[in-house]
Image: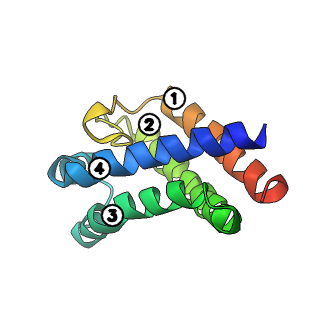
Amino acid sequence: MGYVFVLVLSLVFLLSGILKAISPGEFKETLLSYGMFPPWMIKMAVIFLPWAEILAGAGLLIPFLRRPAALVLALMNIVFIGILTVALKRGIHAACGCFGTLSREISFRAVLRDTALLAMSLYIYLHFA
C-alpha cells in the first residue's frame, strides 16, 4: 500500500506544481479571487508553492527524502484544507487553484480529496519512510 501512496502523491504534486509553474499569472489570479490573502503572501505563494510541490513530489521517490517530503506534503495539505474550508464557509465561488488551468471550482469534494492526500502523506511519514 505504501508504494501506491508514494506514486499517487508524487504524481499529484508533480502535476500540481508543474501546472502552477507554467501558468503563474493564472495561479496569481486564482489566489486573488479568494479575497483572503495580502499581496505579499500571494507573491510568495506564486513563486515558492509550485516548486515546493514539485520538490516534495519528487522527494517521495527518493528513499532517504521520503519521510521529510511526506511531512512537507502533510503540512501543505493541512493548510490547503483550511483555506478551502474557509473559502467554502465564506461562499467564495472561484477555481480552487489546485491544478493550475485544470482546476475546478472550490467544493467539498476538493476538501475530501485533500483530506485523502493528507492521510496518505501521514501514512508514508509514519509507516513507510
Residue 55 visible, this angle: yes
Which one is in front, 100 or 7? 7
Mark 2 or mark 1: which is in front?
1
Q: Alpha-carbon distance for marks 2 and 3?
A: 20 Å
| Residue positioned 60% across, 54% down in the render | 61
Q: Earlier in the sequence, mark 3 or mark 1?
A: 3
Q: Secondary structure at mark 3?
A: helix
Q: Is residue 118 above or below residue 71?
A: above
Tell me if label 2 and label 1 are in contact, CB under 8 Å: yes
> In terms of image quadrants, where is residue 71?
bottom right
Q: CA distance from mark 2 to mark 1?
A: 8 Å
**Amino acid type at mark 1:** Phe
* Secondary element at tag 4: helix
Residue at image position (60%, 60%) is 75
From the image, tell me which residue sits under label 4.
Answer: 20
Residue at label 1? 108
Residue type at tag 2: Leu
Q: Earlier in the sequence, mark 2 or mark 3?
A: 3
**Amino acid at pointer 3:** Ala
Q: Find residue 88 and name its label.
A: 2
**Which label sits in the foreground, 3 or 1?**
3
Horizontal and vertical percent position of residue 113: 56, 33
Contact between labelled residues 1 and 4, with CB atoms less than 8 Å apart: no
- Could you tell me which residue is drawn at 69 percent across and 44 percent down? 120
Distance in Å between CA atoms under marks 3 and 1: 23 Å
Q: Secondary structure at mark 1?
A: helix
Q: Name the quadrant of the C terminus.
A: bottom right
| Residue denoted by label 3 | 45
Q: Residues within 10 Å of mark 4 (few under 14, many from 20)?
A: many
Query: Sequence order check: which comes first, mark 4 or mark 2?
Result: 4
Q: Which of the two residues, 107 or 69, is positioned nearer the viewer here?
A: 69
